[in-house]
Amino acid sequence: MKDHLGRPLVAVTGIGLVTPLAWGREANWAAITAGKSGISRIRRFPVDKLRTTIAGTVELPEEAAGAEPVSAAVRVERMAEVAVEEALGQAALGEPGAFPGPLMVGMPPVELEWLQRFELARQANGSGAYPAITRVATGRTDIYETFLFGGVGERLAAKFGTQGAPIALTTACATGASAIQMAVEAIQRGESDAAIALGADGSVQQEAVIRFSLLSALTARNDNPEGASRPFEKTRDGFVMSEGAAALILESLEHATKRGATILGIVSGCGEAADSFHRTRSNPDGHAIIGAMRNAIDDAGLQPSDIGYVNAHGTGTPENDKMETLGMRAVFGDAPPPISSNKSMIGHTLSAAGAIEAALSLLTIRDQILPPTINHNEPDPAITLDVVPNVARKVSGLRHVLSNSFGFGGQNVCLVVSAAP
């Protein structure tokens, strides 16, 4: 059960999903294939004077019952717990609190949010300067533990009993895919028979929304939230911030087969490439985007013609969609496979996107249904791709899907997921 390079094939045996559409794998998949949108007006903080007032938000149960909103770090951890629990329930691997492998956590950078800063500034006699708030924060273990970047991974590792030190990483919008790649490579190297790969993001908070808005990255179609995210469409004008989490239980195919697990698919190829061209823009020649796609296909031992569908990065920003089109043409030539964007329905889940979209790619193969790109009202003549507009499409014989994740700072990771042998 080796691949073309003599490495262990890596199987997926469990999937957990949380998005603005739903808590849970099957509820999310039903909404995605129905072309439903999870975008709405932001309710967790005042938005009256903001340019962008919409997002894809995930409310925790206590928030829905009227409790005060939690910080992004707490939201990440809570969504991650639910996603991992669902994935473990499907995989039926290990015992409660004892998982036989490492944890790879892809999550956003965390820092003090405005509520905590204002509280500390008041205690520092009105000074918000870093030295002043640091002095008054001494001994505040609640703040320290909440906003320590590695803390989320440590607590999740303790809860699920994973082996070794958890790896917490962030590679911008490629983060979730990077976590999967790291888990796959650990199994391929023979370091473990199994691993948990996780991507989670809960960054819809005041400062993050304002910062992305100042970059002119967000759409301001506030009057029509459900129609605001429109990847590849002529009138696209920016992405919609969103939240969510996805967890994959990965095992060597030999290990999964021996224990009689249901094989949901194979992560057959991982490719990465960086260009370091600009903090937000891709190099106009597209070499890193093209390289990441080709690297993933080569790593899987496939030819471009073997790829039957591409799960797009597809953010809905004018430049990103143009660059992804350039990459598709360079890799696949004049007959590229269909491509569609889950972000048209759930928005851009940032650090979680690569993991969520890999999970949805596996479900695409399972049910032989291509999710739609909704809100595709006016095609862009410069984007000559089959974007599966507006309505899901039934297919047959689909075995290999390429999932693209192109991040700020030129951090690009692509994954090939395949049907079980």
Image (cartoon, rainbow, N blue to C red):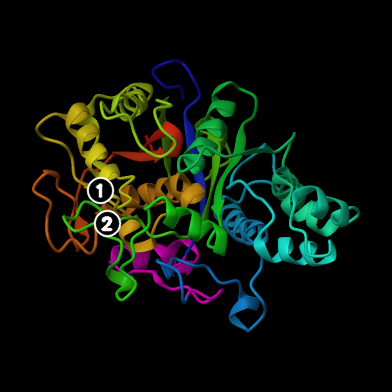
Q: Determine the secondary structure under disc 1.
A: helix
Res 349 seen here: no
Residue 318 - label? 1
Pointer 2: what residue? Answer: 237
Q: Position of residue 130 (x, y in %)?
A: 75, 49
Q: How far from the left and from the top, in percent, is residue 297?
A: 32, 27
Q: Residue 407, image x and y in percent?
A: 42, 39
Q: Which mark is residue 207?
A: none
Q: Is residue 136 magenta?
A: no
Quote the CA–CA distance across marks 1 and 2: 6 Å
Instruction: Give me the residue at 61% from left, 46% from top.
Output: 109
Up-down: is 32 above or below 355? below
Residue at coordinates 48% horizontally, 74% vertically from top-left? 47
Q: Closer to the camera, 64 or 188?
A: 64
Asked which secondary structure carries label 2, the reply is loop
Whether 162 is drawn above or below 293: the answer is below
Q: Nearer the viewer, residue 103 or 50?
A: 50
The image quadrant of residue 378 is: bottom left
